Amino acid sequence: MDVAQLKRQLFAYTALLFHEGFLDEQFTQLQQLQDENNPDFVVEVVSLFFDDSERLLNELAKALDQQNIDFKKVDAHVHQLKGSSSSIGAQRVQRVCIAFRNYCQDKNVEGCLKCLQQVKHEFSLVKNKLETLFNLEKQILAAGGSPPT
Amino acid sequence: MTMAGEILRRQSPAEVDVCGGSAQELHVLAVDDSLVDRKVIEKLLKRLSCKVTAVDSGLRALQYLGLDGEKSSVGFDDLKVNLIMTDYSMPGMTGYELLKKIKESSAFRETPVVIMSSERILARINRCLEEGAEEFLAKPVKLSDVERLKNFVMGGGEVCSDRRINKRRLEENNDRDDGHAPSPVSPPCSCDRAACTSSSSDSSSPSIAPSSSKRLKIHHQG
């Protein structure tokens, strides 16, 4: 595939992710911050987000598995996840976190467990999609193209 | 009431020295327990040619500033920090507690402190502003926010921004997890109210006035 085709593909794919609400304008903000001084900025931040989220999801699973659930602790983790997902523009993850926090405040175990499943699902979706996006960018660079802004 | 530009043209000698050191390079201390957010804020600031020191807790910030009581502040004459940006919700010491300690110190009480938070809780915002925070920024922080701050610190920019006010208005109501009933949040504005698009005439926000006048007082001094 030539560079032009790859670029069109990337453009369309990115637009779709925005349209489906996986990403929001904060992601665009990150892309705009990327420059020649830091050409891997977006990948780096998003990687941090992936690692951080995986850690938080594990903590959440553990916290909700307790006999006496410490909802403050659960809420604290969700708050962190909400914050970082918001910082990179992972809108759907952020939205589930909002609902999740409400269940925490209501001390609703079932609601929390449901949200945990949902947030895990949304996280894995956005991770997948971002990896696809980064892959396309890599292909463009490999084919001799400059990274699309 | 004078216009925003005039208000902010005041420059204390201290500020001028601090900026003039290295071709107007601002040194910002960023405090946030989130690794992701630290990376983003660092990039935002570097994009605006600021020197950044990023730490992960209020305690580390105090240590860096020499305010943790471990060392005397004598050795910190050379430490020029032009702006402190801190997250509100941090384990251990909140941004508010850090703000208080900074404002209690003689070395850094004049240094502008900005609080960042993803939660727009009115009581929290007012508390911070009353304690002397320059501004309360909604997360995720944007380049335009930081640009505005930089201009303000360097003297001559506008503290007040239509986007910030509108964003705040728009984002009220969005999530119940903020834990408060939706109400228009009019950020205390040190510029001419008539010029500002803030339209909140909510007289039940008692803290707005004192905060505004406190900030007005600061801006008109000197």
Image (cartoon, coloured by chain):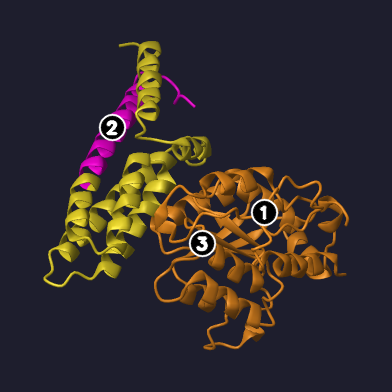
Chain colours: A yellow, B orange
Point out which mark residue A129 bears.
2
- Circles 2 and 1, Cβ within 8 Å, touching? The answer is no
- Secondary structure at badge 2 equals helix
Label 3 vs label 1, nearer the camera: 3
- Which x, y percent locates residue A96? 30, 46
Q: Amino acid at mark 1?
A: Leu
Depth check, front residue: B214 or A58: B214
B199 vs A99, left or right, is: right
Chain ID at mark 2 = A
Front-lying residue, B78 or B112: B112
Q: Amino acid at mark 3?
A: Ile
- The reply, left or right, for residue B160 in relation to residue A120 is right
Q: Residues within 10 Å of mark 3 (few under 14, many from 20)?
A: some
Q: What x and y, as percent, mark residue B129?
A: 64, 67
Q: Position of residue A108 (x, y in %)?
A: 22, 60
In the image, residue B107 above or below residue B169: below
Residue linked to disc 3: B121
- Circle 2: residue type: Lys
Mark 3: which secondary structure?
Answer: loop
Q: Which residue is rendered at x = 23% and y = 50% of the image?
A: A115
Q: How many marks?
A: 3
Is residue A133 on the magenta stretch? yes
Relative side of B101 to B94, left or right = right
Q: Mark 2 Cα within 10 Å, few/some/many (few <14, many 20+)?
A: some
Q: Alpha carbon of mark 3 to alpha carbon of mark 2: how far?
A: 34 Å
Tell me whether marks 2 and 1 sit on the same chain: no
Q: CA distance from mark 3 to mark 1?
A: 22 Å
Q: State whether discs 3 and 1 lie on one chain.
A: yes
